[in-house]
Image: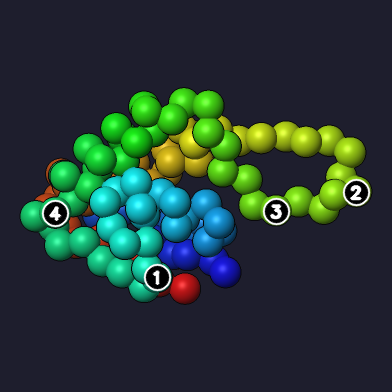
Amino acid sequence: MLVHFQTSAYATITMFGEVAVPLIKLMGHSGSVPGALLAADVPQALERLRAGVADHPGLYLDPRRDEDDGERRHVSLAHRALPLIELLEAAAAAEANVMWDH
């Protein structure tokens, strides 16, 4: 499943569901897709996401890989969250709503 994050203040971001859902939960949301944040709730969600990333610096969110893949490259939570943090920052600055769906 792919999850698309949208706001009028930033370009649409697309992530794998295995990555997006944990990030949505770190924002303090239920993790359900589709979902949305009202503009007034965006700053708090942004702070929760930043705090979650800071609390779990060694956590990796990697979509499943083939077991035959000899190389195991991991992408940290901080790197996975960066595009969503930037989207939330832009939405907060513009006082815009944020939505996500399949």
Residue in front for this viewpoint, 87 or 29: 29
- Among numbered discs 1 and 2, the one appearing first in the sequence: 1
Q: Residues within 10 Å of mark 3 (few under 14, many from 20)?
A: few
Viewed as shown, does residue 52 lie left or right of 56? left
Question: Residue tagged by mark 2?
Answer: 68
Compared with 85, 10 (above or below) is below
The correct choice, above or below, for 57 with respect to 25 in the image is: above
Q: Looking at this view, is 16 or 97 the one in front?
A: 16
101 vs 72: above or below: below
Q: Can you identify the residue that label 4 sits on?
A: 41
Q: Amino acid at mark 4?
A: Asp
Is residue 30 placed above or below 62 in the rendered structure? below
Is there CB contact under 8 Å for labels 3 and 1? no
How busy is the neighbourhood of tag 4: few (under 14 within 10 Å), some, or many (20 plus)?
some
The colour style of the image is: rainbow
Say whether disc 3 or disc 1 marks the residue closer to the N-terminus. Answer: 1
Asked whether the beta carbons under mark 4 and mark 1 sit within 8 Å of each other, the answer is: no
- Marks 3,4: beta carbons within 8 A: no
Disc 4 to disc 2, C-alpha distance: 43 Å
Report helix, strand or loop for mark 1: loop
Earlier-in-chain disc, 4 versus 2? 4
